[in-house]
Every structure is written in structure tokens, then in C-alpha cells.
Image (cartoon, rainbow, N blue to C red):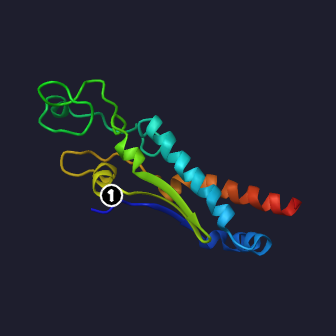
């Protein structure tokens, strides 16, 4: 199982505009840095919203079997196994969120996880784990990327 990553590169629809930015700035690194910050912020907001930003209705609730101790999720344990009823999905230990980082280069911006197996199982769903989307798809970020592109072009026009 591989963890999907959102990687925004010089997409065909943006090429002409990206080339204008590159011509004026010398490279696209500063633009893609802004995009990577937006991607990371989107992931953070998604965690705070229990998945409601990228998944209709948010992340599915923990299953009763999780509370009874038959499945250990890494969240706050209670005596006798299982986890506490008030455990926050994918947030109790902070390991998942800490494993996600954003990066950028002169031709791309991306957000991905270093703990691919654990987060991929949650993101895509596996076995007893329901799908809990963590990392945004490009469609989730398209409007924001377009707004950043327009802003960058406006800044360059005024320079």
C-alpha cells in the first residue's frame, strides 16, 4: 500500500502563467514555496476538523471494537486494553500529523508522509480501518493554487 501524495507541478493549464513568473523571477521556487505552505496548512486544518475538509461528513467514528481493546490504534490506552471513549481520531498521539511534511523545489510543491504504511492504511482504509483522507487531492487545492498564481502575477505586474 502506498500513500498518495499531493504534488503540484507545472501543470499544463498553468504553464504559460508559470513561465511568465519564471521569466520575471528567474525561477518558480518562491511560488512553489507559497503553495507548499498552503498544502501544509490545508492538512493542519483537516486534522483540526476531523477530516471534514477532504471527506464529506469527516472521518468515520472509531468502531466499538476499538474501545473494547481488540484493536490497538496507538491512541490513549485505558486499563484492560482498548482506548478511551473520548479519543480523537488520528490526533491522540500526534504521530500521524507529525509524519506529514510539505516541501518544494524550483518545479514543484508537495505534501507527503514519512510514515507511509501507517498513514496509507488510514488514508485509503485497510482491513478494519475505514478510509480517512488525510492529504488533499489536487482537486481539493485547485482554487487556492489558482488564487496564489493570480496573486503572484499581480505582484510581478506591480514590480
Q: Quadrant of residue 152?
A: bottom right
Q: Quadrant of the C terminus?
A: bottom right
Number of marks drawn: 1
For this view, does 129 lie left or right of residue 93?
A: left
- Residue at x-position 22% and y-position 34%: 63
Residue linked to disc 1: 116
Residue visible at 23% across and 52% down in the picture = 126
Q: Residues within 10 Å of mark 1 (few under 14, many from 20)?
A: some
Picture coordinates of residue 119 (x, y %)?
A: 33, 51
Which residue occupies the foreground of this view, 55 or 42? 42
Between 80 and 131, which is closer to the camera in this rendering?
A: 80
Element marked by disc 1: helix
Image quadrant where residue 112 sits: bottom left
Residue found 31% across the figure and 37% down from its top: 60
x, y percent for residue 88: 34, 31
Vertical comparison of 29 with 117: above or below: below
Closest to the observer, 76 or 137: 76
Quarter of the figure that contains the N terminus: bottom left
Q: Would residue 21 appear left or right of 12 to someone viewing this image? A: right
Amino acid at each position: 500500500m502506498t500513500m498518495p501524495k499531493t504534488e503540484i507541478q507545472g501543470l499544463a493549464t498553468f504553464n504559460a502563467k508559470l513561465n511568465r513568473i519564471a521569466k520575471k523571477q528567474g525561477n518558480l521556487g518562491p511560488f512553489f514555496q507559497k503553495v507548499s505552505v498552503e498544502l501544509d496548512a490545508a492538512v493542519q486544518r483537516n486534522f483540526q476538523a476531523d477530516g471534514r475538509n477532504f471527506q464529506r461528513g469527516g472521518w468515520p467514528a472509531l468502531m466499538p471494537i476499538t474501545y473494547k481493546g481488540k484493536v490497538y490504534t496507538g491512541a490513549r490506552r485505558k486499563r484492560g486494553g482498548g482506548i478511551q471513549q473520548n479519543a480523537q481520531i488520528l490526533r491522540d498521539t500526534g504521530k500521524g500529523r507529525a509524519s506529514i511534511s510539505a516541501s518544494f523545489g524550483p518545479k514543484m510543491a508537495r505534501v507527503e508522509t514519512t510514515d507511509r504504511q501507517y498513514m496509507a492504511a488510514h488514508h485509503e482504509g485497510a482491513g478494519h480501518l475505514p478510509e480517512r483522507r488525510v492529504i488533499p487531492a489536487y482537486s481539493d487545492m485547485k482554487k487556492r493554487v489558482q488564487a496564489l498564481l493570480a496573486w503572484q502575477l499581480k505582484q510581478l505586474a506591480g514590480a
